[in-house]
Image: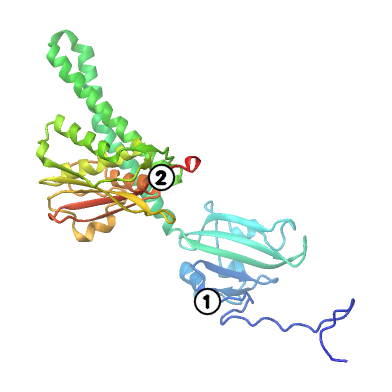
Amino acid sequence: MSVGTSSAPGAREAPRPPAPRAPGDPAGLGIDPDQLPDGLVVADEHGRVICFNSAAARITATPAAQALGQRLETALPLEDLEGGRWWQLTDPYGGLAIRVRQPERNLLLPGGREVLVSARYVRAQRLGPVHRVVVTLRDTEARRRTERSHAELIATVAHELRSPLTSVKGFTATLLAKWERFTDDQKRLMLETVDADADRVTRLIAELLDISRIDSGRLEVRRQPVDIGAAVGRHIQAYVAGGQEADRFLLRLAQPLPDLWADPDKIDQVLSNLLENAVRHGDGTVTIDVTPTASPREGEDTGTSVTVSDEGAGIPEESMNRVFTRFWRGSKRGGTGLGLYIVKGIVEAHGGTITVGRAAGGGAEFRFTLPVAAPAYLA
């Protein structure tokens, strides 16, 4: 009879050797804690620290060698924002037996430095004593950057709203108080100014709504057939009607173009922004090339590219990677600095891509590419 592993009922298997631990793995986690991006602190059933990885040492400014073997509340002296000692308040070893975790929250290290902390209570059996306390630490720098971005957005919006609203208030108050003193032409001029400033406020509010939808991933795209050449032509005609020279614009359409399915209002918004940038910040001829190209979306063969270029000074090389971020301004000629951020969000919501570079004539060149496939319900 050969000797081997028995499959008979009740047969005992030889005990398995413990899995080898990774280097620097005193807690038996199976990985090297120093490879983790977040701070990791593990305390044993007696509340003594048995793991204090390099990220935790960096975040707390406490050497791992100093923390290991100490009581958890000593190695990690955390306080809540009201000054309460967190370990005394949560009492992981003597608290409720049904508690298994502490959700992430802002706590303070000595010196007042904020850190994001969450904890997990590991029990050998349900409702049994705590076997391990596993604590993760994250720096709040990313959150502070987000808060600074929001504060900057609020400041920019407040500044941009103040000017048109002051104008609207001033003209309406003047007209109401002194209506009989003005001629019809003067009244018309004031009302036209009020109308233009109201449009400016409306555009800013629309930009804020777009940013909110882009940041939350809720920007909806309602695809319809779009004649991209005709859309560009309408924008050019509007500029010419507004006083621009017709020969300042050059539209080149490659034929045949594939059928494009996109949200016509949002594509108009993209074209409006890119053409406005070229007219306002560039010089010379504004060239718009519409061509078929490879689709930016996997599984599709064709796409449509639109390239808008000018003959101005262009965008400095060191600014190229910031063009599509919030509040980037290519010059001091006005604007909120939000337009290109929204353009990028709209293009990507369509499954497309957008790039910026230097045009052959030396100016700025923006190129966006959209997939052209019809919506799934028509496929």
Q: Residue at x 36, y 44 (%)?
A: 346
Distance from disc 1 to disc 2, alpha carbons, whole Å, reads 42 Å
Q: Nearer the viewer, mark 1 or mark 2?
A: 2
Location of residue 78 (image quadrant): bottom right
Instruction: Using the image, determine if residue 182 lies above or below residue 19.
Output: above
Query: Could you tell which of marks 1 and 2 lies nearer the N-terminus?
Result: 1
Q: Residue furthest top?
A: 180
- The chosen color scheme is rainbow
Instruction: Using the image, determine if residue 67 lies above or below residue 179.
Output: below
Q: Quadrant of the N terminus?
A: bottom right
**Is there a contact, CB below 8 Å, between mark 1 and mark 2?**
no
Task: Specify the label residue 141 is tagged with.
Answer: none
Q: Nearer the viewer, residue 216 or 8?
A: 8
x and y percentages locating residue 306 in the rendered image: 26, 47
Q: Nearer the viewer, residue 126 or 85?
A: 126
x and y percentages locating residue 25 in the rendered image: 59, 79
Residue placed under numbered mark 2 in the picture: 214
Q: Nearer the viewer, residue 83 or 338?
A: 338
- Assign a secondary structure to mark 2: helix
Q: Is residue 374 left or right of residue 40?
A: left
Q: Is residue 296 left or right of residue 200?
A: right
- Assign a secondary structure to mark 1: helix
Task: Identify residue type, mark 1.
Answer: Ala
Instruction: Using the image, determine if residue 61 lies above or below residue 190.
Output: below
x and y percentages locating residue 261 in the rendered image: 38, 41
Q: Is residue 166 left or right of residue 267?
A: left
Q: Residue at x 67, y 61 (%)?
A: 92
Task: Identify residue type, mark 2.
Answer: Ile
Instruction: Using the image, determine if residue 228 lies above or below residue 139.
Output: above
Residue placed under numbered mark 1 in the picture: 64
x and y percentages locating residue 352 in the rendered image: 37, 50
